Image: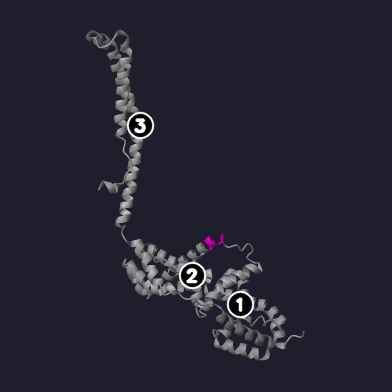
Amino acid sequence: MDAAIEGHLAAGRHARAFDLIVPEFRNRLFRLAFSILKDRAAAEDATQETLVRVWKALPGFDGRAALGTWIYAITRNTCLMELRKRRPTVSFDDPDSTEAQHAATSIATGPADDPERDNLLRLLEMLPANQQQAVRLFYLEERSYDAVAEALGMPLGTVKNLLFRARRRLMELARPEEVQAA
Amino acid sequence: MNQHPHEHALSLGPCPDYEFDLVELLESSLEAGRAGAVQRHMAQCSRCRAYAQALGTLDAALADALPRPALSPGFDARLREQIAQLTQVPNRTAALAAAEREYASMRRNLGRGLGWRTVLNAAALGSVVGGVVVGFDSVAPGLLQSFGLVGPGMSATLTFSIALGAVFAVCGAVFARRPVGGSILLAD
């Protein structure tokens, strides 16, 4: 598929290339956007915004970077801009506070109906943002390290290390609660 | 409260040399020879066994807990619509609106120019009328009196009235040319 897209791009058939890019990338871009924004509607808007930007910029794509790398970078930038826009309106003055973590979890997951699941998601919110994002994307991408590395624009080893540290931290965070519950 | 042996082993953590391998073993990505060595170690090490079991539980819980949303069915249609809006040529309404704005701008510019023109016209006119009044004032009294139309004391008042009337008439004509508001559509 990538070869077909690149063939159209090389021939200057940008509209036809875009017609192939949309079905090839839209779901992957959406999963990446969701792992960053943690909100379905915002992720969908960011995916649409990304593809519009791709459409506008496609005539200037010079092929120095791989097409996927380029498109994922646009997605990450679009999501970061969305997060910056969001920051002043979100009243999480202290992002480390328990209230902020509870609020963030409830925004991301909806109403509480499974205490164990909610507790795990609450613990996940305590991790650094890059670890959270790697964990979310890892499971969205059916445990594919390669897919996560490509989407995040990171070397494979960096992604493995992020996930390794995230899981170790989650187990540390979960342990006192298990001991207390016993 | 006494800890369960499994929890005690878990709280100690895995053997440092095996921690990363235990993750790769769980993911079935460990090279076969190393996987065998790790499994033999686990058979003898309760800490690593407990850690591997906890890793598996965490992995299953995360896979179960994390939401996996999908794009809404109308996504493609909305995207196409947005792209179409960017590609289509401006429609008639937009073109008319642009022409309307241009016409209004021209009118404003014309109004500004007319203001200065009015002042200049009035000055020029004042000079002409002044000249006529001076000339008339020197000639008319004798002329009018020779025809017996006015008395000797009336000439200054008459000439002033004529001059003032001429100034008002010319200024009125100039201001009457100033355009009024309107729409380019009405001009069609």
The verdict on a common chain for dots 3 and 1 is: no
Give me the disc on residue B172.
none
What's under tag 2, amino acid-wise?
A: Ala
What's under tag 3, amino acid-wise?
A: Trp
The verdict on a common chain for dots 3 and 2 is: no
Residue B179 or B85: which is nearer the viewer? Answer: B179
Can you give x and y, in whole percent of width and height, for residue A128 in the image? 61, 69
Residue A45 on the magenta segment: no
Give me the disc on residue A41.
2
Alpha-carbon span between mark 3 and mark 1 = 76 Å
Where does the magenta region start and end? A83-89
Can you give x and y, in whole percent of width and height, for residue B49 in the image? 65, 87
Q: Could you say which quadrant of the image residue B113 lies in? A: top left
Q: Which residue is mark 3?
A: B116
Write down the chain letter for disc 1.
Answer: A
Q: Is residue A158 visible?
A: no
